[in-house]
Image (cartoon, rainbow, N blue to C red):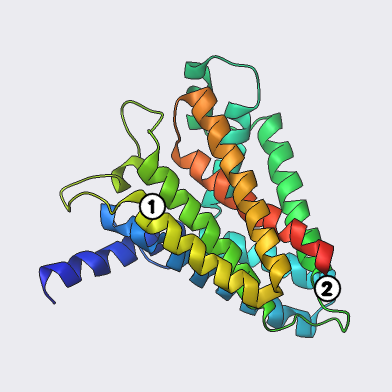
Amino acid sequence: MNDAEDRWFGGFRGALGFLTVAGGAAAPVPAATAWFPLVGLLVGCTIGVVWWAAALAFPPAVAAGVVVAADLALTGMLHLDGLADSADGLLPPLPRDRRLAIMRSPEVGAFGVAAVVTTLGLRWAALAALVGPDGNVPAQRVLLLGGLWAASRALMAGTLLLLPYARPQGGLAARFRSGPDGPPVPGLAVVLPGVGLAAVACAIGLGAPGLVALGAGLLVAAGVVVLAVRRLGGFTGDVLGAAGLLCETAGLVVATAWR
C-alpha cells in the first residue's frame, strides 16, 4: 500500500471510528471528513436493515424501539450526548464563556433532558408510523434512512470544514480540520457530493416526498449550526452531534406525512 492509499484508508477508518463504534480507535485526520457522508449512508442502511427485520417479528412500536436502540448502540450515543450538551449550553440565556463551560461539563441539565426525551420520542414515533399498512417495512425505505443519515454526516463535515471552531484551544473535532497528514479537502467538495448521495437515496426510499424530508432535515440542522455560531462564535463537537441527530429526526418526522 503506497502513502496515498494508506492516507485515504486511514481517512475512512478515522471517519468510521469517530462516527460509530465499529471502526476502533483511530486518530482524527483531515482526510476523514471526505468519508463522513459514505459512513453515514452505511450507518443509516444498517439501521434500516435492522428496522426491516425487526418489523417482520414485532409490532411497529416495538420494531421502532429496537431501531432507536440499535442506532444508539452503533453510534455509541455520541451524537445523543452532543444533543444534551448543546441544549444545556445553547438554549438558556447565558454569556458565551458560561455556555462553553456548561457544554464541557459531564452533568446534564433540564434543557438537555428535555431535548433528549423529545428527540428520542419523535424518532420512535416516526419510525413506528412509517411501517407499511401490512405491518412490514417496505424494503426501499432502508434507503430513506441511509439518505437521511448520509445528509446528517455531510452537514457535519461541511460545518467542520467551513465554519470556525468555538474553543480557542481546540478540541477533538478541530483535529479533522488540519494536521500532519495535510489539509482537509475543500468543504464544498464534501458537502455537495454528500447531499447528492443523500438525495438519490431518499428519492429511491420514498420518492419525491423523500426529497422534501431531506430538505426539512437539512434546514433544521442548519438552524442548529446558525444558533451555535450566533451564541458561541462557532461550532463544537457537541454542536455537530446535535445538528446531525436533529437532521435525521426532522427528516423522519416530515416523512410520516406520506406514510
Crowd rating for badge 2 (residues with CA inside 10 Å; few <14, some 14–19, many 20+): many
- Residue 242 is drawn in which quadrant? top right
Residue closest to the far top: 95
* SS under mark 1: helix
Residue 29 vs residue 243: left or right? left
* Residue depicted at x 66% and y 35%: 112
Quickly name the residue at label 1: 188
Quickly name the residue at label 2: 60
* Residue depicted at x 54% and y 14%: 95
Looking at the picture, which amino acid does disc 2 mark? Pro
Image quarter in which the N terminus is found: bottom left
Q: Which mark is nearer the camera, 1 or 2? A: 1
For the question of whether residue 207 can be seen, the reply is: yes
The residue lying toward the viewer, choosing from 53 and 232, is: 232
Image marks 1 and 2: residues in contact by CB distance under 8 Å:
no
The image position of residue 61, as x and y in percent, is 83, 68
